[in-house]
Image (tube, rainbow, N blue to C red):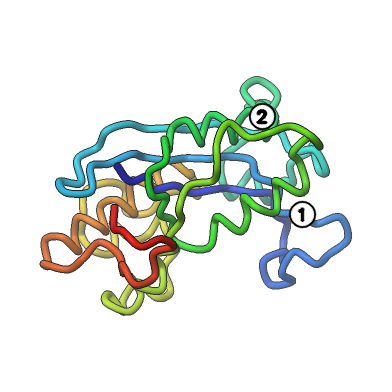
Amino acid sequence: MIVIFDLEYTTWVGAQDRGWTGADEFREIVQIGAVRVDPVTLALDGEFEVLVQPVRNPRLSAFFQQLTGISQDAITERGVGFAEALDLFLKFCDGGYALSYGNDMVILGENLVLQYPPGRRTAGPLPPFVNIRPYLNRVLPSTVPLAAGSLAGALGRPGPIESNHDALEDCHSILETLRHLREMGLPIFDLTAAPSAGPP
């Protein structure tokens, strides 16, 4: 199996342009979304979504809440600690390749430093990871300016025209893009960019 995953993390007006270099700006994960699919048929095998309570900035900015639709109340009611969320995600991956539209694994690494309790071991190793954005942008040039949630709509695929920065919806948008590649007779990602010798 392969896992497509996406993250939403704390942000503020202008933070992306600043590279999150403002005072007390950290890219703390607030939502992890993922779908598990068969690498041959691209049939959906499972979905995963969890909200995470940030620690460095426990109060979400109004900008983040408006951007993602994730409210402070939702985090209070459903949010879990990052360590618990990561363990649940790793169990969902079950050793399969993890694909994202961007370097989301870097954000996971940052949060291991920011939020993971010292001395606690993860439920398993981080999965082998592939950032499929460079490949998709190369073979589908129209996707270059697009965020993950806009991919499916731009390619005329099923689903919402554009998701409101919802991690799980973004995963479905990416999945539809992979199905589009498959229908074009193209690989779903560049195997030369994979982190280990064998394809999924």
Which residue position is annotated with label 1?
A: 26
The number of numbered badges drawn on the structure is 2
Residue at 15 percent across and 60 percent down: it is 182
Instruction: List x then y, in percent, for residue 67.
Output: 58, 50
Extreme residue toward the top, this view: 77
Q: Is residue 3 above or below residue 190?
A: above
Q: CA distance from mark 2 to mark 1?
A: 17 Å
* Residue 94 placement: quadrant: top left
Residue at 41 percent across and 74 percent down: it is 134
Name the amino acid type tagged 2: Ile
Of residues 143 and 112, which is closer to you in this image?
112
* Residue 80 placement: quadrant: top right
Of residues 163 and 58, which is closer to you in this image?
58
Query: Tag 2's secondary structure?
Result: helix
Instruction: List x then y, in percent, for residue 163.
Output: 41, 49
Label 1: few (<14), some or many (≥20) within 10 Å? many
Instruction: List x then y, in percent, for residue 126.
Output: 54, 46
Which of pointers 2 and 1 indicates the residue nearer the eye?
1
Residue 114 shown left or right of residue 134 in the figure: right
Q: Which mark is residue 75?
A: 2
Of residues 16 and 187, which is closer to you in this image?
187
Of residues 17 and 117, which is closer to you in this image?
117
Name the amino acid type tagged 1: Phe
* Residue 118 placement: quadrant: top right
Q: Is residue 132 above or below residue 90?
A: below
Residue 139 shown left or right of residue 6 in the figure: left
Q: Is residue 168 above or below residue 20?
A: above
